Image (cartoon, helix red, strand yellow):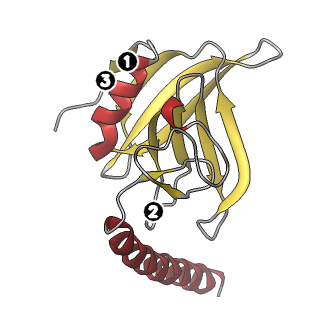
């Protein structure tokens, strides 16, 4: 009985994710008619020439990389800007829950690795907390965004090692 309930829950989550993905796809088609820059903070579409978000006033010129994650596996949205790496957390529904993690203190030992699920890549790094403790963290990005991530890390002057196993 427990196993059957478990599979039913997985099927329900897959259907919800698929429906949400289709709705998002329609919105993306509409957004293509209005080219702009998506604000990482509030997800407002801004004109390309804007230096700050028209909604929340975030400095868009500071953003080096931003990608939101959609699909069956709703990983947190990732922003890399000139001062920090920000992870925008999501709840079970795939919507942002308002929680963010910011990594800005002494990011080091950055490694780019294969992730268990295709087509994702895992970015591992260590950072220093405010209390001085060293912590490990990994973020997940789509492998098709990897060159943008590498460029952002280069602009931040963060050294990294690409240790992905070639297939």
Mark 2, secondary structure of its residue: loop
Q: Tell whether label 3 touches label 2 (CB within 8 Å).
A: no
Badge 2 or badge 3: first in the primary sequence: 2
Q: Who is closer to the viewer here, 160 or 36?
A: 36
Residue at the disc numbered 3? 163
How far is the residue under mark 3 from the one under mark 1?
17 Å
**Residue 27 disc label:** none
* Percent of width and height locating residue 41: 62, 48
**Numbered mark located on residue 154 in the image:** 1
Q: Kindly indicate whether the residue at mark 1 contacts the one at mark 3 (C-beta within 8 angstroms).
A: no
- Tell me which label, 3 or 1, sits earlier in the chain: 1
Mark 3 vs mark 1: in front: 1
On screen, residue 27 above or below 74: below
Q: CA distance from mark 2 to mark 3?
A: 26 Å
| Residue at mark 2 | 70
Q: Residue furthest right?
A: 131
Numbered disc 1: secondary structure = helix
x 33%, y 26%: residue: 151
């Amino acid at each position: 009985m427990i196993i059957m309930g478990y599979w039913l829950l997985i099927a329900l989550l897959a259907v919800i994710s698929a429906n949400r993905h289709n709705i998002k796809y329609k919105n993306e088609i509409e957004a293509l008619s209005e080219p702009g820059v998506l604000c990482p903070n509030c997800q407002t579409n801004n004109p390309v020439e804007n230096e700050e978000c028209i909604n929340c006033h975030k400095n868009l010129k500071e953003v080096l990389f931003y990608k939101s994650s959609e699909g069956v596996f709703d990983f947190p949205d990732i922003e890399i800007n000139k001062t920090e790496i920000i992870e925008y957390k999501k709840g079970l529904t795939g919507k942002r829950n308002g929680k963010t993690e910011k990594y800005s203190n002494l990011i080091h030992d950055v490694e780019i690795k294969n992730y268990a699920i295709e087509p994702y890549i895992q970015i591992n790094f260590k950072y220093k907390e405010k209390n001085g403790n060293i912590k490990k963290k990994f973020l997940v990005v789509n492998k098709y965004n990897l060159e943008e991530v590498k460029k952002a890390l280069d602009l931040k002057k963060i050294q990294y090692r690409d240790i992905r196993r070639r297939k």
